[in-house]
Image: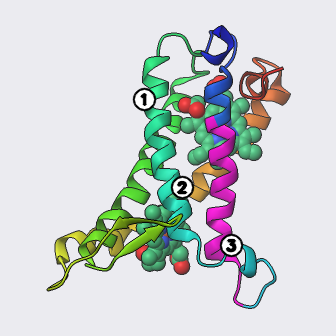
Amino acid sequence: MSNLQDSAQRYGAVSRLLHWAMAALLVWQYLTVIVPEGHFLESIVGGTHKSVGLLLMVLVVIRLFWALSNRGRRPASLSVPAMLGHLALYGLMVLIPLLALVRQYGSGRAFEAFGMTIMSGFDGNKIEWMIAPASLLHGNLGWLLLVLIIGHIVMAFLHRRQGDEDVLARMIGR
Ligand code: HEM
Ligand code: HEM
């Protein structure tokens, strides 16, 4: 049981599963917006942006609660910038899909994902204040998150090579 939880030396199985599953889903998510029309990958990822985005929203909420319940038990941040960087990743992972889901609701259109009706839609006017924030920010923050993720990956490998603390091992496990 205990290796499910985080410890001071490494992230536990649940944290690692959430970290790597979300990393894989984010690769998929960016492919849905990067892959050009007609590319063979489009037949795999095409049309899945909203469903995968919803799944990422659900996972980040679980991950946040898990992180909070493991606070004080997890490996210490390497530095204040590292801690702020992780905080920014969390902030964007919550905000980006949240804005989009609010816009989806405000559009009044039905939203189905994974065979379930998530929003049934409504008749009448769109709700503009629900639509505007995502139209302004969803895509831009989405690209900002991608930049931060690339920085995050570079830093993870830099810290490993510098040999001060093997941060990669904390997230990979043994
Ligand atoms: C963590 C999850 C998500 C990420 C990282 C993400 C990322 C992105 C990015 C980078 C773009 C811009 C594409 C471009 O510039 O052409 C975009 C567009 C879009 N996304 Fe997402 N998205 C996420 C979740 C969602 C969800 C949950 C929905 C809907 C329920 C959604 C709906 C849309 C729509 C409709 C667009 C096109 C309009 C726009 O750019 O705002 N996304 N997304
Ligand atoms: C090849 C891809 C990736 C590598 C090698 C990697 C590596 C790592 C490592 C080594 C840590 C532990 C840092 C420490 O102990 O101080 C970590 C933590 C973290 N990573 Fe990544 N990462 C990757 C992708 C991502 C992606 C796509 C995200 C999503 C935005 C992300 C978000 C986080 C967050 C928020 C933490 C803090 C721990 C937590 O609450 O989960 N990582 N990562």
Residue 139 visible from this viewpoint:
no
Q: Which residue is mark 3?
A: 45
> Would you place residue 138 above or below residue 135 in this image?
above
Tag 1 secondary structure: helix
Quickly name the residue at label 2.
145
Q: Main secondary structure of the magenta part?
A: helix
Q: Is mark 2 within 8 Å of ligand 1?
A: yes
Amino acid type for the residue under numbered disc 2 = Leu
- Residue at the spot x=48%, y=43% of the render? 60
| Magenta stretch encompasses residue 26 | yes
| Magenta-drawn segment | 18-37
Q: Earlier in the sequence, mark 2 or mark 3?
A: 3
Tag in front: 2 or 3: 3
Q: Label 1 sits on what residue type?
A: Phe
State the CA–CA distance, disc 2 to disc 3: 20 Å
Is 40 rendered above or below residue 93?
below
Residue linked to disc 1: 65
Looking at the image, tell me whether mark 1 or mark 3 is earlier in sequence order.
3
Secondary structure state at the residue bearing disc 3: helix
Residue 90, image x, y percentages? 47, 41
Q: From the viewer's perspective, tell me whether residue 144 is left or right of residue 13.
A: left
Q: Earlier in the sequence, mark 1 or mark 2?
A: 1
How far from the left and from the top, in percent, is residue 172? 78, 28
Determine the secondary structure under disc 2: helix
Specify whether residue 135 is in view.
yes
Q: Amino acid at mark 3?
A: Val
